[in-house]
Image: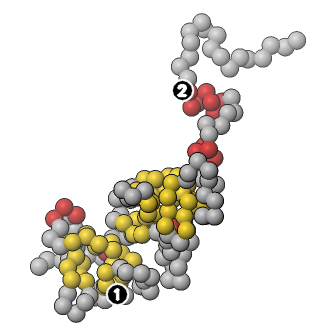
Amino acid sequence: MRSQASPFPTSGRLARVSIPAFVAAIGLSTGPAAAGPTAPDYCDELDEFGHPRYCEPTAPGRGPWWGEELCCDQGRCAEVPVGGCGALSLVYCELAELASDGNVTCVYEAPSYCEVFGCAGDYDEGSELGEEYAMCCHGMDQCYMLAGPCGGSVVWCHDGVSNEDGTYSCLEGNVL
């Protein structure tokens, strides 16, 4: 009988092996997270304009990590109870915000105004003069506070002001 090489050290010293590496080496699953979400991503369902139907925009790089499944109905979501979702839809949200009343809002990171339209010079996000909000823009000069479906570009404005004509201006990269 021919001897096979052992995967274990033979020098008499113990090898250091991390627990995840050991679990992977012996072919065990580390649980549901190892396989990824099984429910559809709630933000993948788009409206007629190509924007997430049930997810709210948030600032680039500031979406709070959620990474779990939720029970939802037309944009109203809650954590999955022990008994499951019942008549509600089981969905996955990578980013979400938990309100004090237990409702969960799935969010997506909207591109910044400067990313979509370009801005003059470098913009320092810490030098904000106006307010932060999501806008619906039909070109650089036709922006409105986002309120419902947007037939233009959804952008995040870090430094915005309202104008007398009802439009909003994003001051990023602009000198007053």
Coordinates of residue 47 in the picture (x, y in percent): 53, 79
Q: What is the secondary structure assignment of the residue under circle 1?
A: loop
Left or right: residue 68 versus residue 40 is: left
Q: Residue furthest bottom?
A: 165
Q: Upstream in the sequence, badge 1 or badge 2? A: 2
Residue 123 in view (yes/no): yes
Q: Tell me the distance, in whole angstroms, between the alpha carbons under discs 1 and 2.
A: 53 Å
Q: Residue at x 35, y 79 (%)?
A: 146
**For the point 48% across and 76% down, which residue is it?**
51
The answer, for residue 173, to whether it is visible in the render is no
Instruction: Check disc 1 and give the amino acid type.
Output: Gly
The mark found on residue 18 in the picture is: 2
Report the amino acid beneath label 2. Ser
In the depicted structure, whether residue 2 falls above or below residue 114 = above
Query: Which residue in the rendered view is the most extreme toward the right?
Result: 1
Residue 50 drawn at (x, y percent): 51, 79
Residue that protrudes farthest toward the top in the picture: 12
Q: Nearer the viewer, residue 13 or 157?
A: 157
Q: Residues within 10 Å of mark 2 (few under 14, many from 20)?
A: few
Q: Is residue 113 above or below residue 166?
A: above
Dot 1 corresponds to which residue? 139
Label at residue 171: none
